[in-house]
Image (cartoon, rainbow, N blue to C red):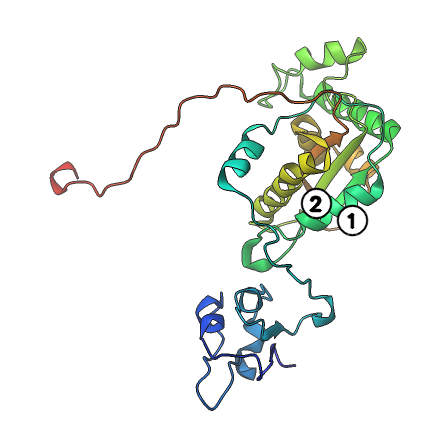
Amino acid sequence: MTAILVDQDLCTRCGICSNTCTMGLIDPADENTLPKIPDAKAKMCIRCGHCEVFCPSQALLLNDRPDEKVPLPAGAGTIAPDEMGYYLKKRRSVRCFTKDPVPKEKILELLDIARYAASGGNGQPVEWIVVHDPEKVKKIAVLTVEWMKTLVNSAHPMSGYVPMLIKPFEAGYDVICRNAPHLLFAHIPEGNPIAQVDAIIALTHFDVAAPAHGIGTCWAGFVAGASREYLPLQQYLGLPAGRTSAYAMMFGNPQYRIYGIPQRKPLNVTWHQEPHENSL
């Protein structure tokens, strides 16, 4: 199958597709030929789409579900730098939620954004489990505390810390899921050495996009730990065979608005310089 489709009437032979090809597969055009990926190299294409999206005349189409091409309206996605700065700086981890559920359609819209996140070799290994029922979220919190109890007086690095979580939870204070109505799990193939990072990148896309849709998020570290180490929770989640939970995130409609930006540590940057010979 031809890896790329090129409209000869639109192609200006500018060479950008060849220059931006991640794998260096596209033979550049000349006055007699259009850009192409030789058949011998076609299997090396990782379907990243760089050739398609960097084409200024939109003459090139990646031949991978071409009917699903998403048009980019003129000016879409352009955000003023200062607005982007404020948007990211005001992002907060939300731990107080209303009981109103987030519609499934809105969750799917956010996950559709997250599937465009970068992944190593464009492997796109991340898949999702959404726990939409608040009662099931509570069950997961209970299972997480059960896992914590197995860590007490063990060599686990959280051994000395978990009693401070178990006690308030058993007293009725949800320190695990913060009474969030929903949980999101990113899961990845077992044994994939780079998929863990891919999952964090994808979850970050969800995390960053959520406030624009009026949704609050919080990284669920305790649940994430239990989902990786506690078999009863893994079984409850119903993870597909050969896949493992990478991380978890709680989310829902935030109870309170954000009115400011908090202080942070001063910026600490080192501009690298090669060491002097006498310092080696």
For residue 239, say whether it is visible.
Answer: no
Left or right relative to 197: residue 23? left
Q: Residue at x 68, y 49 (%)?
A: 113
Q: Is residue 33 above or below residue 237?
A: below
| Amino acid carrying mark 1 in the image | Pro
| Label 2, residues with CA under 10 Å away: few <14, some 14-19, many ≥20 | many
**Spot occupied by residue 167 in the image (x, y as percentages of width and height):** 73, 9
**Spot occupied by residue 257 in the image (x, y as percentages of width and height):** 69, 22
Tell me the CA gap for discs 2 and 1.
Answer: 9 Å
| Amino acid carrying mark 2 in the image | His
Q: Residue at x 53, y 19 (%)?
A: 262
Q: Is residue 204 above or below residue 38?
A: above
**Spot occupied by residue 177 in the image (x, y as percentages of width and height):** 75, 24
* Comparing labels 2 and 1, the label whose residue is closer to the camera: 2
Q: Is residue 116 above or below residue 168?
A: below
First of labels 2, 1 by sequence position:
2
Q: Are marks 2 and 1 in contact (CB under 8 Å)?
A: yes
The N terminus, quarter of image: bottom right
Q: Nearer the viewer, residue 205 or 82?
A: 82
Q: Residue furthest front?
A: 74
Query: Mark number for residue 264?
Result: none
Query: Mark number for residue 187?
Result: 2
For residue 195, say whether it is visible.
Answer: yes
| Label 1, residues with CA under 10 Å away: few <14, some 14-19, many ≥20 | few
The C terminus, quarter of image: top left
Quadrant of the image occupied by residue 90: top right
Circle 2 sits in a helix, a strand or a loop, which is it? strand
